[in-house]
Amino acid sequence: MKTLAEFKASLNLEQPASELSVQLKSLWYDGKGDWHQAHAQVDHLDDQASAWVHAYLHRKEGDIRNADYWYSKARQTRPKLSLEKEWEQLVVQFL
C-alpha cells in the first residue's frame, strides 16, 4: 500500500493489511470508526511516531489536555487542521 487512496480503499476490508505498521493499523481502525481499537494499538507504546497518532486520537476524543501531552511527547504541535485533514496527513506520513 503506497497511497492515501489505496489506504482509504482498504477501509472496505474486514481487517487491516498485516504488513501495516502499528501506527497505520491504528489509523485504519480509526478510519473504520473504531476509536477504542485504534487507541489500543498505540496506547502502550512510547515511541514518537505512536505518540503522534495517540495525540491525534485524544484530540479526536476531545481530550485536548491529554492530546497536547502526547503531541509534546511526539515533538509535534497540535495542528489547526480539521481532524479529517490531520488523519490524512498522518496516513501519508506513515505510508
Image (cartoon, grey):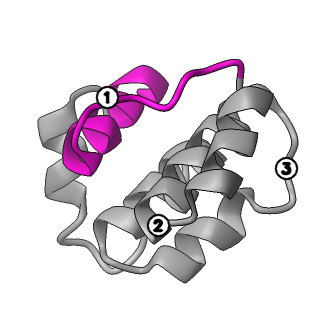
- SS category of the residue bearing label 1: helix
Q: Earlier in the sequence, mark 3 or mark 2?
A: 3
Q: Left or right: where does residue 49 sit relative to residue 7?
A: right
Residue drawn at the location 66% of the way across and 53% of the way down: 65
Q: Which mark is residue 89?
A: 1
Say which amino acid is labelled 2: Gly
- Marks 1 and 2: CB-CB under 8 Å? no
User: Residue at label 2?
Assistant: 62
Report x, y in % for residue 6: 18, 41
Q: Which quarter of the figure has residue 95? A: top left
Inspect the magenta stretch and tell me whether residue 81 lies in it. Answer: yes
Q: Which quarter of the figure has residue 34? A: bottom left
Closer to the camera, 84 or 8? 84
Residue drawn at the location 60% of the way across and 46% of the way down: 55
Question: Label 3 to label 2, Cα distance in Å?
Answer: 21 Å
- Marks 3 and 2: CB-CB under 8 Å? no
Q: Which residues are magenta?
A: 75-95
Residue drawn at the location 65% of the way across and 41% of the way down: 68
User: Residue at label 3?
Assistant: 45
Q: Nearer the viewer, mark 3 or mark 2?
A: 2
Q: Earlier in the sequence, mark 1 or mark 2?
A: 2
Question: Label 3 to label 1, Cα distance in Å?
Answer: 21 Å
Give the quadrant of the N terminus. Answer: top left
- SS category of the residue bearing label 3: loop
Q: Which quarter of the figure has residue 42? A: bottom right
Q: Nearer the viewer, mark 1 or mark 2?
A: 2
- SS category of the residue bearing label 2: loop
Residue drawn at the location 17% of the way across and 71% of the way down: 12
Residue 61 drawn above or below residue 93: below
Question: Label 1 to label 2, Cα distance in Å?
Answer: 19 Å
Report x, y in % for residue 19: 54, 45
